[in-house]
Amino acid sequence: MKRILPAPLLSVALFLLWLLLNHSLSAGHVVLGAIAGLLVPVLLRGLRPLPVRIRRPLSILRLALNVAYDTSLSNLVVVRFLLIKSYRKHSADFVHIPLELRDPNALAVLAMIVCITPGTSWAELSRDRSMLLLHALEVGDPQKLIDHVKNRYERLLMEIFE
C-alpha cells in the first residue's frame, strides 16, 4: 500500500487543490485530480525528507510565535531601511553562523524561517552542516545576529526535532 500511496494526506490535498483551482466537479477534473493526487507523491518520493519525529510539540507554538514576532518586526525595519536613508547605519553583509542543528527536517524549517524573514536570506550550508552562511541586509554586530538565530530558532528547533 505504501508503494501506491506513499503520502495519503498529500494525495488528498493535491486532489482537493486541483478541484478548487479548477472550480469544477466535472468527471474530467475529478479524474485529473485523482491522477495528480496519486502520481505526484509516487514520482517525487525520492525528494521527500526523512520521516519527522517531533519530540516537544509545545515548542512548535513558541517557535511559531517567535517567527511571527520577528517577521513583523523585520518588516518594519526593512521598510524604515528602504524609505529613510538616514536610518541606514550599516551595510549588508554575510555572517557565518555555527550550527549544532543536524536534523535535515529542522534545517529545512530553519531555511524557511530565514527566507521568509525580510532582510535575511539563506546563502549556503557547509557540507558537514556545521556552518550556515547567512546574508543580512544590515549587519552592525555579526555576533548579535548569530545569537539571535541560535537562541530564537536553533535552540527551539533542536528541542522539536532532536
Image: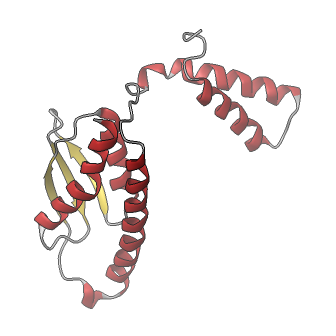
Q: Nearer the viewer, residue 57 or 137?
A: 57
- The residue that appears at 18% across and 50% down in the rendered structure is 133
In x, y percent, where is residue 23?
Answer: 82, 43
Q: Is residue 76 left or right of residue 11?
A: left
Query: Quadrant location of residue 19?
Result: top right
Quadrant that contains the C terminus: top left
Query: Left of 34 or right of it: where is 67?
Result: left
**Quarter location, residue 135:** bottom left
Total labels: the figure holds 0
Give how far across and how far down residue 22 sits, in percent: 78, 41
Residue 84, image x, y percentages:
33, 88
Q: What residue do we see at 20% from left, 54% from top? A: 150
Left/right of residue 17 with respect to residue 62 in the rendered view: right
Q: Give the image quarter of residue 152.
A: bottom left
- Name above or below for residue 88 compared with residue 131: below
- Expressed as whole percent of the image width and height from the top left, the position of residue 27 reads 87, 26
Q: Where 1 falls versus 60 (above or below)? A: above
Q: Residue at x 30, y 56 (%)?
A: 121
